[in-house]
Image (cartoon, rainbow, N blue to C red):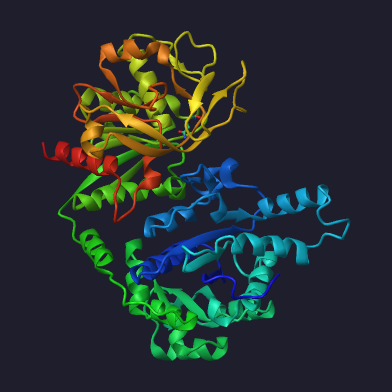
Amino acid sequence: MKRRKRFHTKFIFITGGVLSSLGKGLAAASIGALLEARGLRVTFQKLDPYINVDPGTMNPFQHGEVYVTEDGAETDLDLGHYERFTSAQMSAKNNYTSGKIYYSVITKERKGIYLGGTVQIIPHVTDEIKSVILELAGKEVDVAIIEIGGTVGDIESLPFLEAIRQLGYDLGKENALYIHLTYVPYIKTAGELKTKPTQHSVKELRAIGIQPDILLCRTDRFLPPEIKKKIALFCNVEEDAVITAKDVDCIYEIPLIFHQEGLDEKIVEKLNIWTREPDLTPWQDLVKRFKNPKDEVTIAIVGKYVNLKDSYKSLNEALIHGGLANHLRVNLKYVLSDELTPENLGEFFQDVDGILVPGGFGIRGVEGKMLAIKYARERGIPFFGICLGMQLAVVEFARHKLGWKEAHSTEFEPNTPYPVIYLMKEWYDYRKGTRERREEGCDLGGTMRLGAYPCLLAKDSKVYQAYKQNQIYERHRHRYEFNNLYREAFEKAGLRIVGTSPDGELVEIVELEDHPWFVGVQFHPEFKSKPLNPHPLFVDFIRASFERKKA
Ligand code: GLN
């Protein structure tokens, strides 16, 4: 590895200690927001210690949502935080797992690239890690923020920590900064904040050769000066580099708290970067709106992962963004779809103003979701169907409006006489610029349509009124599509096709005539919503839901 000064890009390495779930991803994203507010251009990378090559096949129960990037990479949900807090655009090169790193080392070994040498963690795996980190450097990036998943002390994360330790040396002091997120619990019985877990965590980090420059201390109150002093002394950091990462009600308040604690000032000082003072008014406005809503709406999310809120991370955020744009608090009511029966629908939905059926895979709960869709359709309740939610809206309409009782998606009933949602045999792929073909009989193994695709909107539609654009780009993650054979029948009966691929072949958006707001989209709009730039469909869905509430 050549030594330093090849790039102008500086690196911040973020590690976590004591326990998981302290909010490392949000801390990284908030640091990015602050640096951007100072006029710097940032990018991010998440390095995940698990062996899966990517999170695409991981169970959302265990791992939370799979975040899809513009270029169609299936990534860790922290990349969603990065995009929501900044203007950085994430892609495949912004998320690596141990699995992906080892895969490429082993592939190189098989190809003989190591010339018969003994392939080892150090230097081969660590060099591979260093090279994917350095890939982020470039003219257009001032600061790259690298988040190491897991907790210091885990066996799995050691190669990553060793790689970033080496990089500190390679890049030089003013080009690499180590920030460590730890936990400072308040112990009620003692009436005291305890610094010991932090001391141990930093000791662990120093044992592998990393001296943190800045400590972010997750806690429920602002740390008093004497506690900061104590932590500074024991952990060998400057007193003003001990930053309170206080619990918040609104995650968009984190950048403001960090700024108040002097974090961004400390970072630019240590990295020796000259910038203007940050302009944080947009974030302040946002938090003000969050804390003083004019009114509220309740949205039911009908899905099967409702017990784990992380499974619908981007969706939850997008709904909150839609609320903020309308000065409304959004109460999310999670409804487990397999608990729904025709008899108990009223119980679940009587107090909701809008119903949303999100994306999903597998047959469990599918019938319950359709009960919810029918309920929304028949009662004029605003309905938003996303991906599987859209597909089921199509199936429900076929069954009950077109009278095709056995209509289904071939994902769930391969032999249905009315395959209104099916695996398309052939289509033009705008991303690859080629015609894609699927083999006869190909089922789950079929490749997914992943990432951003263009979609043309019908001028006289509700979605056009929301987007105010002819052509949009939205992110996909699905195998099945609307079956064009039935297009005319649907349109005649009142389910309009208002968004298609530019060649008209793929149905991307359906909308119900004679309904206040009933929209199904084949894509995942939630991935592109940001608090400072809320997604038009979520803004409009919340607006329509509030209108219904007032009526
Ligand atoms: N299971 C459906 C498909 O593969 C929908 C996927 C989704 O909702 N993301 O097409």
Q: From this viewpoint, which residue is outermost toward the left?
A: 551
Is residue 265 in sight in this rendering?
yes
| Relative depth, front residue between 124 and 272 | 272
Residue 515 horizontal side relative to residue 497, left or right: left
Residue 100 horizontal side relative to residue 418, left or right: right
| Relative depth, front residue between 120 and 78 | 120
Q: Position of residue 82 (x, y in %)?
A: 44, 58
**Residue 56, image quadrant:** top right
Q: Position of residue 257 (x, y in %)?
A: 34, 73
Q: Position of residue 433 (x, y in %)?
A: 51, 31
Q: Quadrant of the C terminus?
A: top left
Q: Is residue 466 above or below residue 254?
A: above
Is residue 335 in sight in this rendering?
no
Q: Is residue 79 above or below residue 256?
A: above
| Relative depth, front residue between 9 and 516 | 9
Q: Residue at x 28, y 69 (%)?
A: 280
Q: Is residue 110 above or below residue 349?
A: below
| Relative depth, front residue between 424 and 316 | 424
